[in-house]
Image (cartoon, rainbow, N blue to C red):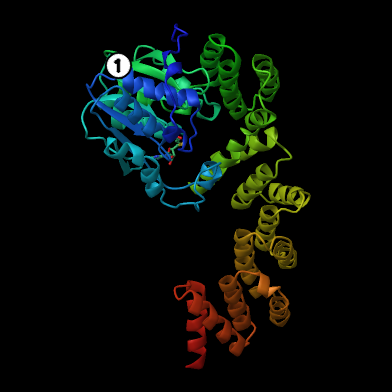
Amino acid sequence: MRDSPARPWSNEALHERLLAIPSMLTDEERKYLIWLTRTVFTWRGAVLDLGPWLGASSASLAEGLERGGHAGVVHAFDLFRWERCYMQMDRAPDLADGDDFHPWFRRMVAPWGQRIQSAPADLTSYRWTGGPIEILFVDAAKSWALTKAILQSFGPHLMPGVTRIVLQDFADSPTYFLPLVFDAAPTAFREVEAVDIGTTVTFVVQPGADLAAVAATCDPEQFPLARSTEIFRRRAAACQGLQRSLYLGSLCYRSAEELEVAQLDALEAEIRTAYPKVTADRIQRYRDASCRLVERGWQAIQSGDLQQAASLARRALQQAPNQPWSVILSTSVALRQRDEKTFLASLQKLKSFPDQPEYLLFHAEYCSHLGDLLQAEADLLATLVLFQDRPTAVRWALGLLSSVLRRQPDLQRAWRVVQRLPAQDLLGIEFQVLCAEVALAAGHVAEASRACELALAAEPDNTRAQHVQHSLAARRS
Ligand SMILES: C[S@@+](CC[C@H](N)C(=O)[O-])C[C@H]1O[C@@H](n2cnc3c(N)ncnc32)[C@H](O)[C@@H]1O
């Protein structure tokens, strides 16, 4: 670990044109990047920015090149696909999930012109062919897999003794794997700089470093809790205040995964002592780390590994028995494993949670599987009445309601239910498709035909409406 506390970048000026770019970096991190390309850069390789978002990091690196009188450029790579959950922040453009924000990036970095070259790229599969790299700024290593892919793709182009790998997420708790991977390879990397306010830590690649071997360690199985604890404890002991609290936070994340709940309580107290200004929000984030068990459980279901999904669901429930998502995961696994006892017990518990669209909808799904069509119908009608302003929930509810109503023995009653829906407040196309399907099932051909035409006029490719249209045509011929 670095032994010099000096922060020579603290005097770099942050001009208005830099501050105008919304950023996830702290001011100190921006100053550090300017200082890096202004004073450390020696022209021996390229300057790369992996994950520039709206361009603040690229602009800081380019600013340093300019201030240092260097002729180089910054190469920036990003998916450039908007994710509201973490990008929709103050002063950022108001974009929808999945929108391309490359044009926004270009607009933000316009003052640096051709000094910044950018291209959309998915770093999980991207291959760099631009020769030796001197500065590799990484703000996209958000998972074990991405860290591994970045080391594999860019590793062969790093120059031993010269290249700086600047890890923006190093001290951030959700990316706790970075200290694990890098600190476990002391012969491959030497730490040279770290910011005070922020999470950036920089390493120089060492002569003889086997980066392919380091990439192979990007795997949670390689870091059992005891080994992880040792690494985070060493980090925490070497610093104070905010930084110390961050590494203890990383240990919280790792402990939460291993269900070391008692350890979490002790760690929380330690964090508060190290950094009394820690927010309740951040403490909650450590506690919520357990939710990642649920995420991994869904991934296991999707990949067909029910055994793994069941084990994760059990662990999530042990850790957070009253967390609705732990219960939903456990119900879904039990359903797929045909474990009736667990399924019914979980279903009962799900019913006890306060009304939220997702809980009601999952409950409806499960009741529909059980054949309890009236309960499923009641959940779906409650969703449509209570959550009319939630388009995703309404869409999901209408789709499921159609299938639930068409399976009921009394189809005339089902059709009356549809006619009583508050149609004007619901999503147009989905509602017309539901009308068309239930009317057809109940034998009301004229109503089915009218609803079908309305749905297809609005969305000619709607496959469910097309299906009703074919059935109507078959009836007529
Ligand atoms: C925390 S933001 C970067 C913040 C930015 N460096 C700044 O100065 O404000 C992380 C960026 O990584 C990008 N990213 C995430 N996964 C990626 C992937 N697989 N390939 C390329 N970019 C990715 C995101 O699109 C996002 O812009």
Q: Residues within 10 Å of mark 1 (few under 14, many from 20)?
A: some
Single out the residue that lies furthest toward the top.
3
Q: Quadrant of ligand 1?
A: top left
Closer to the camera, 429 or 40? 40
Judging from the image, what secondary structure is the residue with disc 1 in? loop
Q: Quadrant of residue 7?
A: top left
Looking at the image, how many numbered discs can be counted on the residues?
A: 1
Residue 344, placed above or below residue 205: below
Residue 173 lies, with reference to residue 411, above or below; the image says above
Residue 222 appears in view: no
Q: Ligand 1: does it lie within 8 Å of the C-beta at label 1? A: no
Residue 194 pos. (x, y %): 45, 17
**Residue in front for this viewpoint, 192 or 403:** 192
Which quadrant would residue 214 be assigned to in this image? top left
> What type is the residue that disc 1 sits on?
Ala
Residue at the image point whose x is 71% and y is 53% from the top: 356
Q: Residue at x 30, y 39 (%)?
A: 113
Residue 259: horizontal and vertical position, in percent? 64, 27
Choose between 263 and 44: the one closer to the eye. 44
Image location (x, y in percent) of residue 34: 38, 24
Which quadrant of the figure contains the N terminus? top left
Residue 110 image position (x, y, % from top left): 35, 42
**Residue at horizontal 59%, vertical 88%?**
445
State whether residue 148 appears in this view.
yes
Q: List the residue tagged with mark 1.
A: 209
Side of 373 where 93 appears, left or right: left
In-image side of 424 versus 80 (left or right): right
